[in-house]
Amino acid sequence: MLSSFKSGYANLITSGSHLLLLLVALRINERPAWIGCLWLISGISLFAWASNFKRNRAIADLPTSKVASAAQGYVELYGRTPSDAEFLAPNKMGSLPCVWYRQVIYRKTANDKWQEISRETSDNLFALEDGSGRCLIDPQHAEVITSNTRTWYQGDYKHVEEHLFPLDHLYALGEFATLGGASGHLDLKQDIAELLTGWKKNQSELLQRFDLSGDGQIDLHEWGLARRAATREVERQHRDLRQQPGVHVMRAPANGALFLLSNLSPQQLGRKYVLWGWFHLAVFFGAGAAAVRLTL
């Protein structure tokens, strides 16, 4: 049940479980069965309400940042997917240019129910642009909610596809980090050691540069000169690297916080979670009250 709430269908899945429990209670049609199923429905609805409340608060509590000025850490971005970041989603009804897709295939069973037989989700990086800069999105472990869905049938098989297209509006809530550039972490000692190790592998060139005495060996004084030369070289490389622009990336937070991507606006997402929250809260109280009444 916990993993179910990481997809856009979580609320529908929860509602489906309510109906299933009601059918079980109707089939058994005994008071203990009704009491047990109603308590289960109430508990599931409480969990669903908490999940929707958490998502709504995460969206409402964070102001939208600009890519160019976003702080390192947990942020909210809103922009568009660029037109130049396209790849083709694999499907049998014609390839659609998109930046992200999820494809689920179901097969009809002997009792006319749909059974999931395969699921594929793209993990290619794509970009978000908001006019101030570009941020690469790593969609692994993201909860993706998109209005771009289609369902088609092929014999006993049902294909459900979801996409994020080029030029879609894109809302992103996750861990923001800038790699490289002025804020990049560079280890001077390690880089000097690696450079000297590389020089050692080419003894002839090392001797040509630093064997001042011409005796075919590098003494302590000459090795000190080599270390100073390596230090100057690494410091120059670090200056050049820090002058280059960093690469902005958004990915799943390491602490397990919500990582959400959607082509809906933050206002639309907030309203969606509020409405579902009220629905689940009503079911929680209704099913709980009915279970208490049957118990008495």
Image (cartoon, helix red, strand yellow):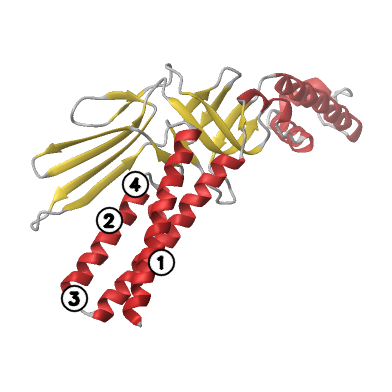
Q: Which residue is mark 1?
A: 43
Q: Label 1 to label 4, Cα distance in Å?
A: 19 Å
Q: Point out the tag, 3 or 2, that comes first from the N-terminus.
A: 2
| Residue 132 falls left or right of residue 224 | left
Q: Point out the tag, 1 or 2, that comes first from the N-terminus.
A: 2
From the image, state whether disc 2 or disc 4 is nearer to you.
2
Q: Label 3 to label 2, Cα distance in Å?
A: 20 Å
Q: Which is nearer the eye, 3 or 178?
A: 3
Q: Residue at x 44, y 61 (%)?
A: 46
| Residue 276 falls left or right of residue 61 | left
Image quarter of the C terminus:
bottom left
Q: Residue 93 location, x and y as percent?
A: 18, 28
Mark seen at residue 9: 4
Q: Residue 56 location, x and y as percent?
A: 51, 45
Q: Which residue is mark 2?
A: 16
Q: Residue 83 location, x and y as percent?
A: 42, 17
Q: Amino acid at mark 3?
A: Asn
| Residue 93 falls left or right of residue 89 | left
Outermost residue to the right: 221
Q: Amino acid at mark 4?
A: Tyr
From the image, state whether disc 1 or disc 3 is nearer to you.
3
Q: Point out the tag, 4 or 3, that comes first from the N-terminus.
A: 4
Q: Label 4 to label 3, Cα distance in Å?
A: 30 Å
Q: Which is nearer the eye, 272 or 187?
A: 272
CB within 8 Å, label 1 to label 4: no
Q: Label 1 to label 2, Cα distance in Å?
A: 14 Å
Q: Point out the tag, 2 or 4, that comes first from the N-terminus.
A: 4
Q: Amino acid at mark 2?
A: Gly
Q: Amino acid at mark 1?
A: Gly
Q: Point out the tag, 1 or 4, that comes first from the N-terminus.
A: 4
